[in-house]
Amino acid sequence: MFSWLASHLATLLIVLLLLGIVAGCIATILHGKKTGKSSCGCSCGHCPMSGACHKK
């Protein structure tokens, strides 16, 4: 078991790093949704969904 772990240590560290980055991105998106932020980049006049996201 330890020899397999030692031989694949670099791969495991890279996978753990990538999983951490993905988890951080998901957490940031969810936190933004909870606080009311959106991914809208303004200029809603040209957006086909402007009526759905910004109700007047």
Image (cartoon, helix red, strand yellow):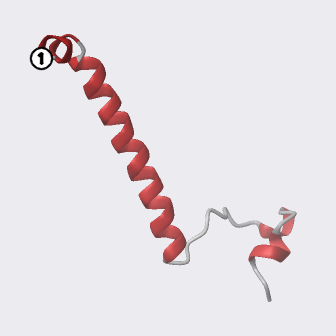
Give the left or right position of residue 43, taking residue 5 as reference. right
- Of residues 40 and 4, the one nearer the viewer is 4
In the rendered image, which residue does mark 1 sit on? 2
Q: Residue at x 81, y 75 (%)?
A: 52
Q: Up-down: is 19 above or below 39?
A: above
Q: Quadrant of the N terminus?
A: top left
Q: Quadrant of the C terminus?
A: bottom right
Q: Position of residue 21 (x, y in %)?
A: 38, 43
Q: Residue at x 31, y 26 (%)?
A: 14
Which residue sits furthest front?
1
Give the left or right position of residue 47, taking residue 3 as reference. right
Tell me the element at label 1. Answer: helix
Q: Position of residue 49 (x, y in %)?
A: 83, 67
Q: Residue at x 30, y 34 (%)?
A: 16
Q: Residues within 10 Å of mark 1 (few under 14, many from 20)?
A: few
- The quadrant where residue 28 appears: bottom left
- Of residues 22 and 36, the one nearer the viewer is 22
- The quadrant where residue 33 appears: bottom right
Q: Position of residue 3 (x, y in %)?
A: 14, 11
Q: Residue at x 34, y 29 (%)?
A: 15
- Of residues 55 and 45, the one nearer the viewer is 55
- Of residues 3 and 43, the one nearer the viewer is 3
Q: Up-down: is 11 above or below 55?
A: above
- Name the amino acid, label 1: Phe
Which residue sits furthest left?
2
